[in-house]
Amino acid sequence: MASHIKSELEITLYRGFEGTGAYVWSPFVTKLEARLRFAGLSYHAEAGSLFKAPRGKIPYVAISKTDSSCQIPVTPTMLADSTLIIAKLVEDGVSEDLNAKLSSTEKAHDLALRALLEEKLYWYQGYERWHENYYTMRPHVLSALPYPVQLVVGLLAYRKVTSTLHGQGTGRFSGEEISLFKKQIWENVNALLAESRKKKTETGGGDDIFWVLGGDGPTEADAVVFGFVASALVCAAYGFLNTAPESQKVVKSFPAVVDYTRRIHDCYFPDYAWPVENKDAC
């Protein structure tokens, strides 16, 4: 049933930036791209706009059903929020449920790992990008705007992000404390992946992809982990020093994390530039 439905669908993924063949800075965009590719679903990418996005969020998708026998144009279904998009695809039978065969304990571990990255690490990375590297991030994120407009819109964005981070709680910590929190998260993710890689090697699959929960295939957590790793690796700061943000350096210091990402990249994203070498996609 799912394969028949797949052939009838056209999926447009709006990533927030022009261009293809490269990862963008948003972990949620790459999460969704990975999830679509895990499911074998084809899509084409466009920039889109926050002003047109349902819920005002990137990424979002337009899903159209194709029917050569029908001459009446069908209005595409617009969906936003990477988690809700994936849930809808599973609900409609377009994609299999990657977590269907997990035990209750494994499902809890999967959900906890996703929450750790999406509900904690996301805010730490937001602080790093928009507070500590604001002047180097602004010209790229707002590159479509004239420079004088960048200054005004950038200041408004900075104030909004700063206020949100303070209200959420991250902005109440020092930069040193946030750096420690980020490193602790990546240390534990690396430990999980190192154990999974060891298990894969011991069972004769040393060259295969090793998944974060140690199973034979990906779970929903793998799309999230891959999205956040790729986001950290691709996001180099701009400016006179041209140095990478701290997250990129931290992630590159953990061999299992980089190895895991490289194997998924080579298998599922052979058309994309390896993120460490792509310095213009942040």
Image: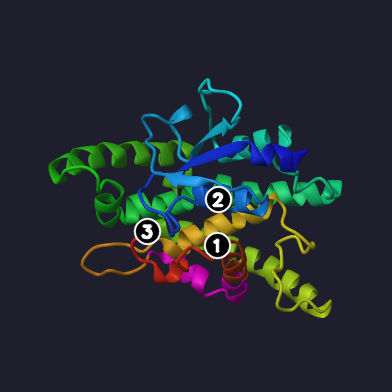
Q: What secondary structure is found at the residue carrying circle 2?
A: helix
Q: Does label 3 or label 2 sit earlier along the sequence?
A: 2
| Residue behind mark 2 | 33
The answer to whether residue 253 is above or below residue 106 is below
Q: Position of residue 7 (x, y in %)?
A: 65, 41
Residue assigned mark 1: 269
Residue 127 placement, left or right of 136: right
Q: Secondary structure at mark 1?
A: loop
Q: Is 105 placed left or right of 239 in the picture?
A: right
Give coordinates of residue 281: x percent, y percent. 37, 58
The secondary element bearing badge 3 is classed as loop
Residue span colored magenta: 245-259
Q: Amino acid at mark 2?
A: Glu
Q: Which is more N-terminal, label 1 or label 3?
A: 1
Disc 3: CA contacts within 10 A as few (<14), some (14-19) or many (>=20)? many
Label drawn at residue 281: 3
Please identify the quadrant where the N terminus is shown.
Answer: top right
